Structures are given as structure tokens and as C-alpha cells.
Image (cartoon, helix red, strand yellow):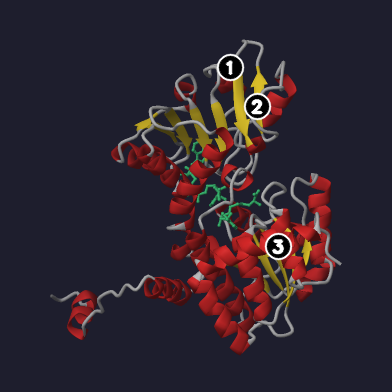
Amino acid sequence: MSEIRDITLAPSGERKIAWAKRYMPLLRGIEEEFIREKPFKGVKMTASLHLEAKSAVLCRVLMEGGAELRITGCNPLSTQDDVTAALVSGGAEVYSVHGCTMEDYDRHMAMALEFGPNIIIDDGGDLVSMLHRDMPQLLPGVLGGCEETTTGIIRLHAMAREGALKFPMLTVNDARCKHFFDNRYGTGQSVWDGINRATNLVVAGKNVVVAGYGWCGRGIAMRAKGLGARVTVTEVDPVKALEAMMDGYAVKTMDEAAPEGDIFVTATGCRDVIVERHFLKMRDGAILCNGGHFNVEVDVDWLERNALDKSQGRTDVTRGYTLNNGKTLFVLAEGRLVNLASGDGHPVEIMDMSFAIQALAAKYLAQHRDSLPCQVLEIPDEIDYDVARRKLASCGMTIDTLTDAQRAYLESWAL
Ligand code: NAD
Ligand code: SAH
């Protein structure tokens, strides 16, 4: 049933999955519980994820919980064909091929949905939007879903505002054990890993421009500073701009930063952050990449249409665009998420926490199947605290507990 590149790649994928699982104690613990409890017995599930080793571990945990699971990618460049081969060898149904066309990407998603899932695990909102747009007949069977990332949640809120959302969606990204760590430290490390793999250049001494000082931007700027770069931040939110200034960064507009930057990284979730007028001011050899959701933060379409020459570039996905001013700009990973398209995405231990939230949120949906409203819902605090406690325990760390007197003191107003 599956559609993947090549099943003979399975042994390499299996090694990657085994490596990841070794460093995912939270998911291993949840897997043991799921094997006993089978919370997804009789539940059909569709997951759209970056199909690399950590996601494969999550998928297997959900299947151990009894789910009948269909899996598809969430970005044409982040699927790893050896990992999908391992998943299929292990009995999973997978529809995803690295580097496929957008038509095939949509076709794979439709194949993963057409059996009528009860629970959706989405990363970016593509499953939810295809279900509502193209497969409304399947909506009554969906008891709910979980959304992994910031932009997906923004899309869900837009649907809910218009009354279009037809099943409850839990916002995994908004759990503190997700965005505090995944968006900040995960993106902070993995974006630089992706840039380093794609360019093989030194970061120290370079002028790095980070667009957006949200959770991801903070991490990207922090790690750039640690690598020895001079960092400039661009923002549209005055409070975040001040925070960046107090954190020690230069804060400028993109127009001001464009002529100065050696490496530009966008992480805004917005569109048209770096466009023609910026390109034309940039230094020869400037490197542009994106850590935000879609490939619209850097206007790669304009470069594709207007470059005089596109022959330079280190790899297929590190393309040089020579402009009519004689300067060449390099775009990494087609302007898609550089950490996942040029690397393996976030580090393993980070995804262990994010996916622990995913797994427990899916269990929560299965348990509360008839009582949740068709709205965008926060992850209950108890899941957040549960994951934090599991993580502390896995690190061998203990923390203090409030005494009764301390609790009374904190809860009292008449001191
Ligand atoms: P966030 O809302 O915390 O931060 C976004 C920031 O960008 C905000 O401070 C906002 O004011 C700023 N911004 C918006 N438009 C801007 C513009 N035109 N110019 C400059 N700044 C602008 O969101 P986040 O959690 O940091 O996520 C950012 C993006 O990264 C989202 O699209 C999210 O889905 C994606 N994401 C990617 C990864 C990854 O693995 N690469 C991980 C998590 C999130
Ligand atoms: N469909 C979108 C996906 C957004 S990616 C796209 O166009 O690519 C942002 C999400 O990827 C983050 O919230 C993060 O949790 C997730 N992520 C980062 N590294 C990952 C990894 N190694 N494996 C799986 N998911 C990862």
C-alpha cells in the first residue's frame, strides 16, 4: 500500500532510528505504558511529520499504542528515504518520497487521509486544511487532532475565527515543554547545523542578520553569537525589538541590514521578509536561508525569475543567483526550513520532549473523544508538567517541593 523511494534502504534507516531511540527516554517510557494500555485500540490515525528518525520513533510508539497509522511527510525536502523504508519494513504505511513534486506531496497526503482517520497529527496544518477543503465527507469521523508548530496554530485560529474548524485541535506547540525548548534551543542549534552542512563556512566574525525575535529567532541569534558572529535582529514587534537590544544585539530594519549581512536567517512565520529591494543592496556572496515555516520568507520566486545565471552553488539545494548588478546571492535549501532540508532537524533529545507532548496529547484526545469542543484547545497543564517531570527524572535531577506553609504563603493576600 505504501509509496516510498526504495525499500532496500531500510537497514540504514533502522540504524538511524535505533540511534535516536537510545536518546529518547521519554518516548521509550511512554511506549511501555502504551503497550500495556493500548489507548489507541480501534483508532485510525494520520500523521504528517518531517519523516526522519525521531518522527519514526514517535510513529512506532503510536502504533504500539494500538493505532492504525498512515504516515506522510510535512515538507518535500525533509523526508529521509531510508527512514521511510525502515518504517515500511516494520509494518507501517507510509506515503512520502524525498524531493517529490508538490503535486505528489498533495497526492501522498490524500492517500494518507482517504481511509478516514479519527485522530490527526499535523505539522503545519496541511492535513487539517486538506480534510476541510477537499475531503469534507471524512470530517464527521475525526475526533480531533494535534498541531506541532506555530504557523499551523496561526492557521487553525484563522479557521476557528471563521467558524470553519470542524473538530477539536490541541496546540502542541503552545505547551511550554514544546516551544521553550524545541523552538528556541532546537531551532537555535539545528539551523546552524543546517547552514554549516550546506556551506562548510566559518561563522565566527561574520555579520549574521536574524529576522524575527520570537522563540525560534531568539535561539538562532543566541547560537550565532556563541559561534562568534556579530548579530543584527530585525523585528516588527517593538517589545521583541527592545528585548533583542537588551540581549545585546543590533536592531535594524531589513533595509538597513541588507547591505551589511553575510548570512541572513528568517524565522518570522511571515512572508516577503527579504525581497527584491533588499537583494539589490546585498553584498556579493551573501547567504540567505529560512528557519520559519514556509518558503515565502525569502522571495526565492523573484530570484528564480530574475537571476541572469543560476549555475553556481555547492549542491543542488544551495543555489547561486547572479543578479544584473553582477553580484551572486546564495539561497540554501530553496528557502525552505534549512535545519530540516539541509540537516536532520532538531536534536534528538529536543524532539523526545516535543513528541512526548504529541503522544500524550493524542492519548488525551482518545480519552476525551466526546467531550471536547470543535475549537483550538490548549494542552492541559498536567501534560506539560508530566513531560517536564519525566525529563527531569531521565536526567537524574530532582527539584524542591513547596511545603504547606510555603504554599499557604504564596496563596495568601493578607501577609
Ligand atoms: P513567534 O511568533 O514566537 O516569532 C515570530 C517573530 O517574528 C515575532 O516576534 C514577530 O513579531 C516577528 N515577525 C513577524 N513578521 C515579521 C517581519 N516581517 N519582519 C521581522 N519580524 C517579523 O514564532 P516562532 O515560534 O519563533 O516560529 C517562527 C516560525 O518558525 C513559524 O513559522 C514556525 O512555524 C516555525 N518553526 C520552525 C521550526 C524549525 O524547525 N525550523 C521550529 C519551530 C517553529
Ligand atoms: N509543514 C511545515 C512544517 C513546519 S516545521 C514545512 O513547511 O516544513 C516546524 C516544526 O518541525 C517544529 O515545530 C518542530 O517541532 C518540527 N521539527 C524540527 N525538527 C524536527 C525533527 N528532527 N523531526 C521532526 N520534526 C521536527
In front here: 328 or 218?
328
In front here: 133 or 267?
267
Vertically, is 246 above or below 361?
A: above
- Identify the residue position indicated by label 1 in the image: 280
Image spot of residue 22 (x, y percent): 52, 68
Which one is closest to the eye, mark 3 or mark 1? 3
- Identify the residue position indicated by label 3 in the image: 11
* Marks 2 and 1, how far apart at CA: 19 Å
Q: Amino acid at mark 3?
A: Pro
Residue 408 shows up from this direction: yes
Q: Amino acid at mark 2?
A: Gly
Vertically, is 242 above or below 40?
A: above
Vertically, is 414 above or below 296?
A: below
Image quadrant occupied by the N terminus: bottom right
Of the two numbered discs 2 and 1 on the same chain, state the one appearing first in sequence: 1
* Marks 2 and 3, how far apart at CA: 32 Å
Residue depicted at x 56% and y 33%: 199
